Image (cartoon, helix red, strand yellow):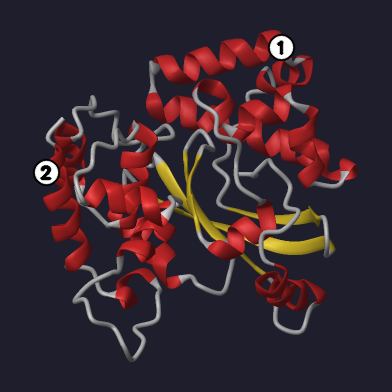
């Protein structure tokens, strides 16, 4: 691992980003041309001390997940992201999906602009890649899982705890929507082993999934009306919207409520409540 080259690369990428590019205030006393170290650490979900060690070349060994988070925080393009992994002597993971996926720049740019409404980028298998603070406050952070459990669809049919985010009477609707969406994704991907393994595993573990899969209903989820159970605010009625990347492998989800509704009032309270006592499973 080339510690000094990694440190220099991180600093050069940090220096080029304006705070406004990532939804941060500029402030009157900014002495650096780009982001501060602590701001990069915050955006990547790291401690400021750990990021400082990386940028000083002190010998930290970042994992693939840390590198992926830094690539998102520093808004690296595909080539820059691959270079970051090479400098850290880590295998470059697939770009489109999984917990180390490289978020599509267009979706990430839009997410940066959504500062007051919950929004997140997920894969087509409903793996959460990045969230803005209102989304964390509304939904909580996803579990730090790899493999099938990184997918909320997989957890929905295998882990009862994942379903507590929605009222029980809404569960049949969400089950149908998830399966129909997965049918569409499977068709789009063709003979994809990742989807095949997930479908095989879910058919074996969940009779509900197997029954719904055999209906062959197909529908990508573009919009949906949701009732989300929040531990402090109760049930929040929201509309969920989806914007797909060009290749269909990633989606930007955002939540809204009509002005003047109780849902709109509850959304405005999220910034006050923050992320305390959030539920652990994030719907996607």
Which residue of the protein is positioned furthest toward the right in this rendering? 169
Residue extending farthest to the front is 58
Q: Is residue 41 visible?
A: yes
Between tags 1 and 2, which lies in front?
2
Image coords of residue 202 (percent x, y): 65, 16
Residue depicted at x 70% and y 82% = 259
- Label 2 residue SS: helix
- Place of residue 246 in the rendered image (x, y in percent of width and height, measured from the top left): 32, 48
Residue at 37% across / 63% down in the picture?
38
Figure check: 1 above or below 38? above
Quadrant in which the N terminus appears: top left
- Residue 268 in percent (x, y) is at 69, 77
**Mark 2, residue position:** 4
Residue 120 drawn at (x, y percent):
51, 54
* Mark closer to the chain start, 1 or 2: 2
Q: Give the residue drawn at x 54%, y 60%.
A: 119
The number of discs equals 2
Horizontally, residue 280 falls left or right of residue 43, namely right
Give the image quarter of residue 257. bottom right
Residue 9 image label = none
Whole-angstrom CA distance, mark 1 to mark 2, is 48 Å
Mark 1, Cα crowd under 10 Å, few <14 / some 14-19 / many 20+, is few
Task: Give the SS element for disc 1.
Answer: helix
Residue occupying the point 19% across, 44% down: 57
Disc 1 target residue? 205
Along the line of sight, the residue nearer the viewer: 262 or 160:
160
Label 2 Cα neighbours within 10 Å, binned few <14 / some 14-19 / many ≥20: some
**Labelled pair 1, 2 in contact (Cβ < 8 Å):** no
């Amino acid at each position: 691992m080339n510690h000094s080259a990694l440190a220099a690369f991180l600093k050069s990428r940090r220096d080029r980003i304006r705070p406004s590019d990532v939804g941060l205030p500029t402030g009157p006393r900014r002495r650096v041309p780009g982001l501060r170290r602590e701001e990069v650490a915050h955006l990547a979900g790291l401690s400021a001390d750990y990021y400082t060690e990386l940028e000083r070349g002190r010998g930290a060994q970042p994992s693939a997940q840390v590198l992926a988070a830094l690539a998102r925080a520093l808004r690296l393009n595909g080539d820059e992201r691959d270079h970051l992994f090479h400098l850290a002597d880590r295998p470059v993971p697939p770009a489109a999906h999984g917990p180390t996926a490289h978020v599509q720049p267009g979706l990430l740019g839009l997410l940066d602009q959504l500062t007051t409404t919950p929004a997140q980028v997920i894969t087509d298998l409903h793996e959460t890649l990045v969230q803005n603070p209102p989304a964390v406050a509304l939904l909580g952070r996803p579990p730090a899982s790899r493999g099938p459990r990184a997918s909320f669809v997989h957890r929905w049919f295998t882990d009862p705890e994942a379903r507590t985010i929605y009222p029980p009477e809404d569960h049949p609707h969400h089950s149908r929507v998830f399966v129909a969406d997965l049918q569409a994704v499977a068709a789009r991907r063709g003979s994809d082993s990742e989807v095949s393994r997930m479908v095989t595993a879910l058919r074996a573990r969940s009779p509900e999934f197997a029954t719904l899969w055999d209906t062959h209903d197909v529908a990508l989820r573009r919009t949906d009306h949701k009732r989300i159970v929040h531990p402090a605010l109760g049930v929040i009625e929201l509309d969920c919207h989806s914007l797909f990347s060009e290749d269909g492998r990633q989606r930007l989800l955002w939540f809204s409520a009509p002005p003047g509704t109780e849902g709109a009032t509850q959304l405005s309270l999220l910034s006050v409540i923050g992320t305390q006592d959030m539920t652990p499973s994030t719907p996607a």
